[in-house]
Image (cartoon, rainbow, N blue to C red):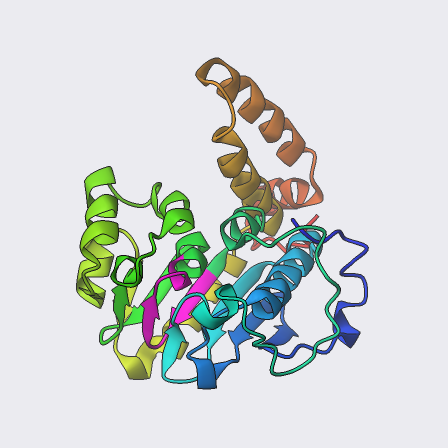
Amino acid sequence: MQYTQQDTSNFATQNFAYIIVEEKDNVLTITLNRPEKRNAFHAPLANELAYALAYAHYNNAIWCVVLKANGPTFCAGADLKAFAGDDTTEKQSTIPMPKDMVKLGDEFNGLHKPCIAQVHADVYAGGFLMIGGCTHVIAVESAKFGLPEVKRGIFPFQVMATLEPLMSARQLLDLCIRAKTLSAKEAQEIGLVSELVKEENLTSRVQELIAEIKEQSPTAIRLGLKAFQEMKTKNADEKHKYLHAMLMQCLQSKDAAEGITAFKEKRKPEWIGE
């Protein structure tokens, strides 16, 4: 993560300019809030998002993250004016500067918490870094998805790393090369979207999914997601040794003790996230 645990210690007192954050019932909801720019992200918005994800990563009281957006577009990708060097800082926030340039794909990989994208509208270009990094993407049937970068003389380089685990190489390259806009159904067929719902059911379905996730051990899920990311860096002959060590760590957790006790006593476990 680009931010340390110490960096996020005063999270509750920060002034966010481009996102809205709400922490409630072990869930952190992050809402992209630059609707007048179609939620196109520039460095300040990316920094705020990375800061919120880091807070969720370090805070064991956060069991799930929801990513939403205000306005008629979920995310239009990167703000090209900002990339061209224009000053696009409309508002000031108190978020500290990161130690290095934020790479959103890495920030989502390092979250190690379930993250649900609540997609109410279209997603383009670098917006794929966000939804591609989520564990679940619930989208309305009318949403559209596209990588139009080549039409502007650019290629979606970083998006490739995020999408590579989700779809075949040919599907990914075709999406990048032809810049075709996908329907929500087509996006689901190639693995970009988890589930489609009618617009009026979007919020309730996300809440149902949150409830399902919170029934499970947050510690087991956190360690499992960490192991899933770490496996990518291990050689084939190292994976099982590493995963056995992670299993031993999980078994020593308070949640594992509670889960086993609850099973013996034939009751629902009461998770504490440790």
Q: Quadrant of residue 78?
A: bottom left
Magenta-tinted stretch: 116-128
Which residue is rendered at x = 59% and y = 54% of the image? 102
Of residues 94 and 9, the one drawn nearer to the viewer in this rendering: 94
Q: Position of residue 158 (x, y in %)?
A: 42, 48
Q: Is residue 197 above or below residue 272?
A: below
Residue 122 visible within the image: yes
Q: Position of residue 118 (x, y in %)?
A: 41, 70
**In the image: residue 157, left or right of residue 223:** left
Q: Quadrant of residue 119?
A: bottom left
Q: How many marks?
A: 0
Q: Check the image and name the residue furthest to the front.
A: 85
Q: Position of residue 212 (x, y in %)?
A: 45, 61
Verify whether residue 122 appears in magenta.
yes
Verify whether residue 151 appears in magenta.
no
Which residue is rendered at x = 27% and y = 65% of the image? 145
Q: Position of residue 195 (x, y in %)?
A: 29, 62
Q: Quadrant of residue 230?
A: top right
Residue 190 visible within the image: no
Of residues 41 and 237, the one drawn nearer to the viewer in this rendering: 41
Which residue is rendered at x = 58% and y = 75% of the image? 87
Which residue is rendered at x = 49% and y = 59% of the image? 115
Of residues 134 and 72, the one drawn nearer to the viewer in this rendering: 72
